[in-house]
Image: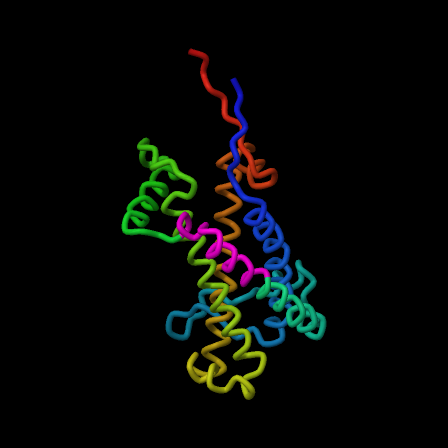
Amino acid sequence: MKKIVEKHPFAIRWFHWVNFPILTIMIWSGLLIYWANDLYHISVGSVTLFHFFPEWFYQSLNLEQRLAEGMAFHFVFMWVFFINGFLYVLYTWISGEWRYLIPNKHSFKEAWLVLLHDLHLSKTIPPQMKYNGAQKIAYSAIIIMGLGSVLTGLAIYKPIQFQTLCNLLGGYQSARLIHFMLTIGYCLFFLIHIAQVIRAGWRNFRSMVTGFDILTSKKK
């Protein structure tokens, strides 16, 4: 016997699906801006192990000579990103949804169990709930990262007007580095999130689109 069970409220689904293309545009336009002064790299002493980013990376994405375009897109969509994020946090607070998202003292242990299970290093199934420990930590971290992106973005966008904020972040170069590191964090989150969605299967993806899940119960 099949039973339809509500899983995700409309607002959560709306904010989720709106945020995905917005954040994609922000990362893409941010790369257009960063290309003009791509100074970050990983080095050991005088040896550069990896430069963000190799020339082939820019060429493959056609990022060269598009600084003005990147700035135009970035400065417009940053407000859409901020408003959508603010409304999401406001909704979770008013609706009480935050109770399911905030990590608790058991979340890190649960996240470790989820990792071991996903890597097939443990057959123990993690606790099954609306959001497991790993999801709580990841989704809460994304909210904090979003706030960090807004603050560092304002600091490097208007370093004179927001001089106090810029100074609190360690200066312009420090704010820009933090902003860049947060962007790399979003990219890693995207990759892990998509991998988890694929692993979870069609039912999980469908519930994030429709808001419900179909459960099959055995006949007694």
State yes or no: residue 220 in magenta.
no
Q: Which colour scheme is used?
A: rainbow
Q: Is residue 175 left or right of residue 67?
A: left
Q: Residue 96: within the magenta?
A: yes
Task: Please report the residue visible at 53 percent of the width from the left and 42 percent of the height from the top.
Answer: 8
Residue at 38% over, 53% down: 102
Q: State the image coordinates of residue 32 (x, y, percent, origin top left).
A: 64, 68
- Locate the C terminus by quadrant: top left
From the top left corner, tell me how far across and down residue 18 is, in percent.
Answer: 62, 53
Of 118 and 101, nearer the camera is: 101
The residue nearer to you, when weighing 101 against 51, is 101
User: Please, is residue 165 above or below residue 13 in the view?
Assistant: below
Question: Total of numbered circles in the picture?
Answer: 0
- Image position, residue 63 (x, y; %): 67, 65
* Chain part drawn in magenta: 84-101
Residue 62 or residue 77, whichever sits in front = 77
Q: From the viewer's side, name the closer residue of 163 and 51.
A: 163
Judged by its main secondary structure, the magenta piece is helix
165 on left or right of 69: left
The residue at 48%/51% (across/down) is: 95
| Residue sitting at x 65%, y 72% | 75
**106 versus 48 height, above or below:** above
Residue located farthest toward the front when viewing the structure as drawn = 94
